[in-house]
Amino acid sequence: MKVLHHRERLDRIGAAVLLVQHRAISDPETGGSYTVKLYERVSPDAVLLKPQTDVDGYEPIEIQASADDLRVIAELVEVLGVLS
């Protein structure tokens, strides 16, 4: 993963797999405020964080986001290889 300057990146990104932090996110297993999901801007003021799984219990998270509330930690840029 690559470290990003989140303020600039959020302004121009369409959809990508991101590690993000937001105070509205709460992981029941760890209590953390981080998630790895497909980021999709649905309006100028809202983003949708969509899980890429069909496992029960993982739902999309819609956030009314400003650059101050939603912090991008990293972006999945490339999968280098598959372990056998």
Image (cartoon, rainbow, N blue to C red):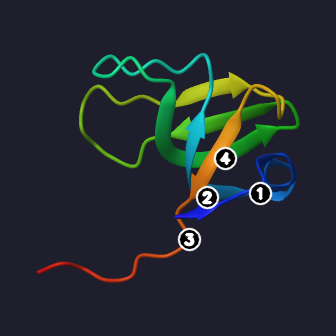
Element carrying mark 2: strand
Q: Earlier in the sequence, mark 4 or mark 1?
A: 1
Between 5 and 82, the one nearer to me in the picture:
5
Between 1 and 12, the one nearer to me in the picture:
1
User: How far apart, in angstroms, are the residues tagged by discs 3 and 1?
Assistant: 13 Å
The answer to the question of whether label 4 and label 2 lie on touching residues, with beta carbons closer than 8 A, is: no
User: How far apart, in angstroms, are the residues tagged by discs 3 and 2?
Assistant: 9 Å
Q: Earlier in the sequence, mark 3 or mark 1?
A: 1
Element carrying mark 3: loop
User: How far apart, in angstroms, are the residues tagged by discs 4 and 2?
Assistant: 7 Å
Q: Provide residue 69's location: percent of width, then percent of height.
A: 75, 25
Q: Is residue 24 above or below residue 79?
A: above
Q: Provide residue 45's location: percent of width, then percent of height.
A: 85, 30
Q: Provide residue 11's location: percent of width, then percent of height.
A: 87, 50
- Determine which residue is flagged by label 3: 77
Q: Quadrant of residue 59?
A: top left
Q: Residue furthest left?
A: 84
Q: Residues within 10 Å of mark 3 (few under 14, many from 20)?
A: few
- Determine which residue is flagged by label 2: 16
* Three-letter amino acid code at the position of disc 3: Val
Q: Which mark is residue 13?
A: 1
